[in-house]
Amino acid sequence: FMNNIKQIDQKFIEEHTVFTELISEIRNNFSTNKVLTPIRHHHDFPNPEVNENSTLFLMPAWNPSKNAGVKIVTVSPKNDQFNIPTIQGSYIYIDAVKGLVKAFLEANSLTVKRTAAASALASIFLSNKDASSLLMIGTGALSTNLIKAHVSVRPINSVFIWGRNFEKATAICNELKNKNFTIHPIRKIEEKISEVDIISCATLSKIPLVKGKYLRNGQHIDLVGAYKKDMREADDETISRASVFLDSYQLGLKESGDIVIPIQNGTLKESNIKADLFELCSKLKLGRENYNEITVFKSVGHALEDLAAATYYYKKYIDESGI
């Protein structure tokens, strides 16, 4: 059986992603809500060689009698000294009837694509339809994907990017310079944060980078990084001014400082969180209610998104190879 297992690598995923299609696949999965996702395993383990803990995530998902999968991911925050990405991983895609492994997918690219697609999916419900400018905070692997995904669902014609390393921000601008939008690096977040329609943030920051005092009515804030309880990308003032949405209550309420800290200190009540992607996609709840509302979407990632993305790439791979 091992001979039949497909290997779907980063190159294939990079070359075969059409964000509007991937967003649609993920949206269908959230709206039908048939995928079973046990709580993900999350293990911090010591990494004395670099003097900072690493984290192992196991993320299983099951669409009964159809397909299943598990993502195995390690997060090693000090990997920049080895010139390799912080996140490493594999996705094992399984036939849910027979239990056979159908494919191994390279999980870094799968994860950044599905994460960017989930943010753009949220933006369909939460940003104003005429949103035409985006500020990207962060220059990691997610940033280019978040830009492309957001641009695929809104008429964005100008993008600004900020990172701790200005050269990295400039390099991303060069990489994306021939797209149908202009893109410029900025040296300070304050230069553009008040002007743009959408702010997307994907960092490992422990100190808030999005400050509520700079926000104006009608903006949408997409918080994607800060995956631990002691990390946060937006301050209390942002949270108190905004309508807050999550990808899922199951993890969103537990894992990120952007939600956990404001709940602990009384800035945010759990009951005031407006909706998650399941409720938005199945039309159980409304997203943005008026043009001037400030909306915040906090993404922590969901195993359903991985399974939807693995299914999307597996279908493409089979179509392409004619098997």
Image: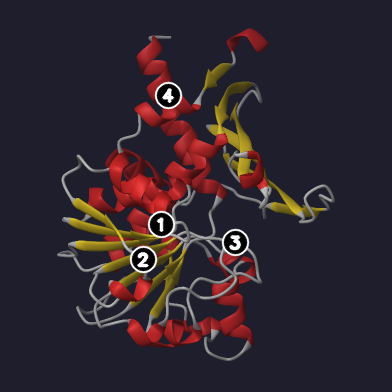
| Front in this rendered view, residue 49 or 58 | 49
From what the image shows, is residue 297 above or below residue 39?
below
Image quarter of the C terminus: top left
* Amino acid type assigned to the residue bearing label 1 in the image: Phe
Q: Which mark is residue 227?
A: 3
Say which label, 4 or 1, has the lower sequence index.
4
CA separation, marks 1 and 3? Answer: 24 Å
Q: Mark 2 sits on what residue?
A: 187
* Amino acid type assigned to the residue bearing label 3 in the image: Tyr
CA separation, marks 3 and 2? Answer: 25 Å
* Amino acid type assigned to the residue bearing label 2 in the image: Arg
Say which label, 1 or 3, has the lower sequence index.
1
Side (left or right) of 4 relative to 33: right
Q: Mark 1 sits on what residue?
A: 166
Say which label, 4 or 2, has the lower sequence index.
4
| Badge 4 element | helix
Image quarter of the N terminus: top right
| Badge 3 element | loop
